[in-house]
Amino acid sequence: MGNAGYKWNADNKINFNSLFINTSSQTTEEYTGYIVDIANDGNGFRRRFKYDKDRLWINQLLGDHTLSERTKFNWATSYSTITGDEPDRVQNTFRKEAAGYVLSSISAADNHRYFQYLTEDEIALNASLDYKISKNAEGDYKGKVTLGYSGKIKKRDFEATQFNLKANSGFTNTIVDPNNLDLFYNQQNYANDYFEMSTFKGGSQIADATDPQFYKGDLFVNGGYINTEYKFNKLSGVLGLRAEVLTQKVEWNTSIDPVGGDDQLDKFAFLPSLSLKYELTEKQNLRFGFSKTYTLPQFKERAPFVYEEVTGTKFGNPYLYESDNYNFDLKWEMFPKSEELISVTGFGKYIQNPINEVTALSSTNDVTFFNTGDYGYIAGAEVEYRKQLFGFGETNAKKLTAGFNASYLYSNQQLDAAKVAKENGGLQAAFTEKETKLTGASDLLLNADISYLNEWNEKQSNFMATVAYTYFSDRVYSIGTNNMGNQVDKAFGSLDFIAKSKLNKHLGLSFIAKNLLDPTIDRVQENKSGDVNVLSYKKGITMSLGLNYQF
């Protein structure tokens, strides 16, 4: 990470920021239990090896220019690029018998090697002109008007190849060693027709790897806005009016549609917003906010590409379109002392054409994305409290602080199978219920933390340690279909520890340990006959040690 700035006088300056992140992860995942038609006695075993390598590079150039006492011009442009590489993923599925393990031969994709590569480039431009208005007797301005433009161009290219390995007739019950599959998957056995190999486009030749599945995505967004900010004594507010024109294009050639195709989503969005603040006292405020936003489907949610997850299969839906959101909140806040806060917030959201993951009506039970009804809504309340428990030394060089946040929300959405059938070109969903909670939304969310800070050497050096706990109540993972109930992720909590120290002006250390309690997380299907546990797992404990040097 680096930044540089140039200021040629008090009224004009530019800044350049650059950030590069390279990450990689290598995992081995093992699953045991019931696999339909493969291990009906709960004796299934699935193992997946996965290596991911991702790179992100962001570059920003920003300008700040004071044209006059009243007028200021700001601009910013950025270029970012992302590459996501999964150079070798291996999955094998077994059934454990008395004599040992047998490879699954029900579906060709049960045993495979998979390769994917993604690139995404984005160019963005923002520009705004501020004009101060209503100068008072003291020489201060009560408000300002801002005219602005924002634009974005994004381009994504994705391709993937999967080699499926399926045992041929006569070798489907061969006992294998899960830790040494080269004894079965080798050149000699392939030549002797022990197993066949195909890509997930159906080809049986290695040459098919030169013709991978792909999808391409393009996004163009142009927006203009005007904001008016004004202060009426104790009341201040910001009124914003924004208009956007966007086009999202997706092109593909996949196993679902080997002929290939494309689709374009066009939208004009009018997005008003209002923010009000009333100063009850010097330490208390009352705030109100309203805004209209939209949720745009991701490229992968609209491209008909099949992604084989360990416990299920998902594919994109080109008929998917955006949701419109109307957001409201009313908040009371009080600041008893510096760094202390007490607040109570009521909030709500109304969603038109909400997007959900749903099992499509088919023989494969694959999951896709639908606008599942005409509306959904959320109503809730949030309480936050932050307190300095004690502080001593000059300017509180040593202090202990604590925070607590709790939110409760009620959510509901309409489910309309007729709407899904009408809008999705033959794809259908048979919802079990006519309405349900929004997916991914917990009724109760709790956060609590306690932190210790010690500063010395004229605050050039410090040490800070934080213990943080988060709790999620039950939340819907996927909506029930075909007379089956919703799949629900059961409640769990997570405990983290973060320690950071700035040793001197330049050098810093950090240690982070996440999910220290490592609870078992269950996903159940809430059927009328009783809950069925469909997935049980632990995330594991993650620890990291960091060293940073600041110039």
Image (cartoon, helix red, strand yellow):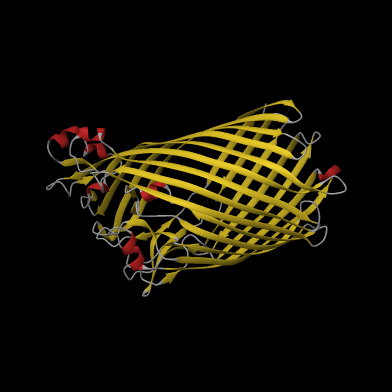
Against 135, residue 355 (above or below) is below
Q: Quadrant of residue 156?
A: top left
Residue 431 placed where, x, y %? 35, 68
Q: Is residue 210 above or below residue 283?
A: above
Task: Please name whichever residue, 519 or 356, is drawn nearer the observer in this view of the structure.
Answer: 356
Residue 66 placement, left or right of 262: right
For the residue pair 485 and 347, the one nearer the viewer reads as 347
Q: Quadrant of the N terminus?
A: top right
Q: Position of residue 460 (x, y in %)?
A: 76, 33
Asked whether residue 224 appears in the rendered view, the answer is yes
Query: Residue 387, percent across and down?
Result: 75, 56
Lateral position of residue 530 relative to residue 475, left or right: left
* Residue 354 position by quadrant: bottom left
* Left or right of residue 10, residue 290 in this image: left
Q: Is residue 251 above or below residue 271?
A: above
Residue 486's image quarter?
bottom left
The residue shown at (16%, 33%) is: 188
- Residue visible at 60% across and 50% down? 496
Looking at the image, which is closer to me, 368 or 176?
368
Q: Residue furthest right?
A: 138
